[in-house]
Amino acid sequence: MIRTLSTACAAAALGTALAVPAHADGEVRVEPSRAEPGETVTITAPTSCNDPVATSNAFPYGVQVQLSSADDPTSGRPLGQTEIDSAATPTAYSVDVKCSDGSTITGSVEVVPIGTGPGPDTGGGGLAALNGPRDWGAALAAGAGLVLAAGIGAAVRRSRRDRTEFDA
């Protein structure tokens, strides 16, 4: 029984390993993956997808983006650019890339409210992650909480130390 089960598991694993996806060289990428309405995004498709055309409800009505490998000679991956629709509501949108063989590969982009996008690439410092005044309020509240906790800890320690000296 165990040998039969082991053989079945090995066959299933081998079948899974031999199954090659239609576009083994990758997936659809959208950069930035979080974008504000009106922001330009770059869509990249796998090299195995010939004559790719990208569509999404996040793009202005009816826009179809023709991707071209000539636009990215370093990787050879077809890419193209478009803007996120200025009226797009903040949510996740699928980005469908249709290849000439009729297959469709799907990626995604998250539309975020204006003023909460990824911000400038400043090297990844902590301040680069903050997205406006409300984030400063959260940071200040967290800092004040830490200072308060440290003060309480110091007071408790001092009261215990004073009590031990008094008892001795």
Image: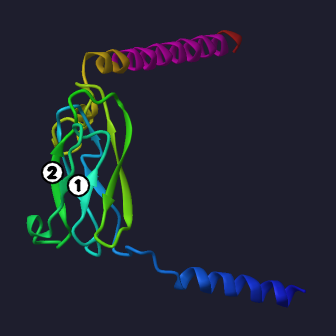
Examine the rendered structure and indicate whether residue 10 appears above or below residue 85.
Answer: below
**Which residue corresponds to mark 1?**
43
Examine the rendered structure and indicate whether residue 158 appears above or below residue 6.
Answer: above
Q: Secondary structure at mark 2?
A: strand
Picture coordinates of residue 161, whole percent (x, y): 60, 16
- Bounds of the magenta segment: 140-165
Measuring 55% from the left and 82% from the top, which residue is drawn there? 17
Picture coordinates of residue 5, whole percent (x, y): 82, 83
Which numbered circle lies on residue 166? Answer: none
Picture coordinates of residue 144, whole percent (x, y): 40, 14
**Which residue corresponds to mark 2?**
81
Q: Quadrant of residue 22?
A: bottom left
Magenta region's main secondary structure? helix
- Whichever of callouts 1 and 2 sits on the residue coming sooner in the sequence is 1
Examine the rendered structure and indicate whether residue 45 appears above or below residue 121.
Answer: below
Quarter of the picture holding the N terminus: bottom right
Q: Secondary structure at mark 1?
A: strand
Q: Quadrant of residue 14?
A: bottom right
* For residue 155, side relative to residue 108 (left or right): right
Query: What kind of residue is marked 2?
Result: Gln
* For residue 118, side relative to residue 109 (left or right): left
Within 10 angstroms of label 1, few (less than 14), some, or many (20 or more) residues?
many
Quarter of the picture holding the C terminus: top right
Of residues 114 and 119, the one nearer the viewer is: 114
Query: Is residue 154 within the magenta segment?
Result: yes
Query: Is residue 92 within the magenta segment?
Result: no
Q: Are marks 1 and 2 in contact (CB under 8 Å)?
A: yes
